Image (spheres, helix red, strand yellow):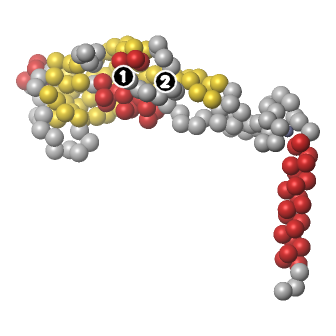
Amino acid sequence: MASPLLVNIAELLRRAGSTREVEKQVDASEFNFSDERIVAGSKVAVDLTLEALTDGIVVRGVLQADWRCECRRCLRSLSGRAEVEVQELYQLVISDPDAYPISGEQLDLLEMTRENVLLAVPLAPLCRVDCPGLCPQCGADLHTSPCSCASEVRDERWAALDALKIDKDQPK
Ligand SMILES: [Zn+2]
Ligand SMILES: [Zn+2]
């Protein structure tokens, strides 16, 4: 199946400095993200400017994608829209190790978009910076239901500290 982000650049390559806009909404399924964070059925927004250089094309612009995952502490579901600014190089003859290839008179923005979107979606987000999470003992959601184990946990910690102190205080 042809890439939905294949761009013909024959025109661009004729004159260094010439530009072309690519503005598209591409279904997330086209990218084969194999990543549950990318919302299935959503659109990835691609808004790029291609500019011809003497030996390639520089691509600049913004990519956006919808993500969904769980707070790493309390497991609440979170969602958002990742936005990433990109500046990438495409070359006919690859001399820059980070460059993407140009094949013939076509350039495919799919893999570049895929890689940048995956880097832009959060890896292990928190619902808020001070998320209290779940009680490690009873599993209660500490946002809403402070459980009775809380004090025991604290007591255990104090006990551990006291034990350390006693060790230190004891003459060797
Ligand atoms: Zn949370
Ligand atoms: Zn608890």
* Nearer to the camera, 11 or 4: 4
Residue 101, compared with residue 95, is above or below; it is above
Tell me the crowding category of disc 2: few under 14, some 14 to 19, or many 20 or more residues within 10 angstroms, Cα based. many
The structure residue drawn at horizontal position 11% and vertical position 23%, both measured from the top left corner, is: 105
Q: Is residue 60 visible?
A: no
Q: Residue furthest bottom?
A: 172
Coordinates of residue 142 in the picture (x, y in percent): 81, 34
Tell me the crowding category of disc 1: few under 14, some 14 to 19, or many 20 or more residues within 10 angstroms, Cα based. some
SS at mark 2 in the image:
loop
Residue of label 1: 31
Q: Is residue 15 left or right of residue 90?
A: left
Q: Are marks 2 and 1 in contact (CB under 8 Å)?
A: yes
Image region (quadrant) for ligand 2: top right
In the picture, which quadrant includes the C terminus? Answer: bottom right
In the picture, which quadrant includes the N terminus? Answer: top left
Could you tell me the amino acid type at mark 2? Ile
Residue of label 2: 38
The structure residue drawn at horizontal position 91% and vertical position 46%, both measured from the top left corner, is: 151
Asked if ligand 1 lies within 8 A of label 2, the reply is no
SS at mark 1 in the image:
helix
Coordinates of residue 69 in the picture (x, y in percent): 58, 27
Residue 112 falls in image quadrant: top left
